[in-house]
Amino acid sequence: MSADDVRRAITRIAHEILERQQGPAQLAIVGLQRGGAWLAEAIIDALHQIEPNGAVPLGYLDVSMHRDDIGLRPVVPGAISRIDFPVDGATVVLVDDVLYTGRTVRAAMEGINTYGRPRSIQLAVLVDRGHRELPIRPDYVGKNLPTHLADDVRATRDGVVVSRGAAS
């Protein structure tokens, strides 16, 4: 995906979010630290361009302490969580750059519940690369990108790059 492809995908995701929610009321966007933070900010910008009078709160969530693999690998907090709005009764759209196994999203759902009880939780991702280990499915997807297990996928505003791994 090029930078233009990323921009178009973000705009499309923002439109889909507003259409599904029938506007910005009771909506909140939460970017998962680190990869989802920039994408959440870009989605907020796109939402404000579409609905200039709709104020949608933006938060950030570090899921490090909610992961289910804490004993298997070192825990390194990615960044600080900041959710300074009530999530009770809101539709919270979790945002991440790349969806892979689903374990980060599982941790994010647990993490968001420490801030309250949302009406619903939805998921927006720029890239869905498959290989799920948990029954997690995104509500909004920029691009489905089939990959090999050993591939590395990097998503930024400048584009999406897949580095091919040794396995096939």
Image (tube, rainbow, N blue to C red):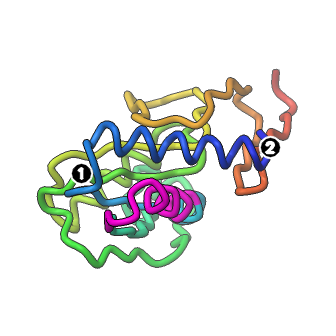
Q: Residue at x 55, y 40 (%)?
A: 99
Q: Residue at x 44, y 42 (%)?
A: 15
Indicate the position of residue 75 as horizontal and vertical percent values. Answer: 52, 66
Q: Residue at x 30, y 37 (%)?
A: 20
Cα–Cα span, label 2 and label 1: 30 Å
Q: Residues within 10 Å of mark 2 (few under 14, many from 20)?
A: few
Our reading of the magenta stretch's main secondary structure is helix
**In terms of depth relative to the viewer, which is nearer, 69 or 14?**
14
Above or below residue 122? Residue 91 is below
Q: Residue at x 19, y 70 (%)?
A: 86
Residue 35 location, quadrant: bottom right
Give the residue type at disc 2: Ser
What residue sits right under mark 2 in the picture?
A: 2
**In terms of depth relative to the viewer, which is nearer, 133 or 95?**
95
Give the residue type at disc 1: Thr
- The answer to whether residue 120 is magenta is no
Indicate the position of residue 123 as horizontal and vertical percent values. Answer: 40, 43
What residue sits right under mark 1 in the picture?
A: 91
Residue 161 location, quadrant: top right
Q: Secondary structure at mark 1?
A: strand
Count how many numbered circles sit on residues in the image: 2
Residue 25 falls left or right of residue 82: left
Q: Earlier in the sequence, mark 2 or mark 1?
A: 2
**In terms of depth relative to the viewer, which is nearer, 160 or 72?**
160
Above or below residue 131? Residue 27 is below
Q: Secondary structure at mark 2?
A: loop
The residue segment tinted magenta is 39-55
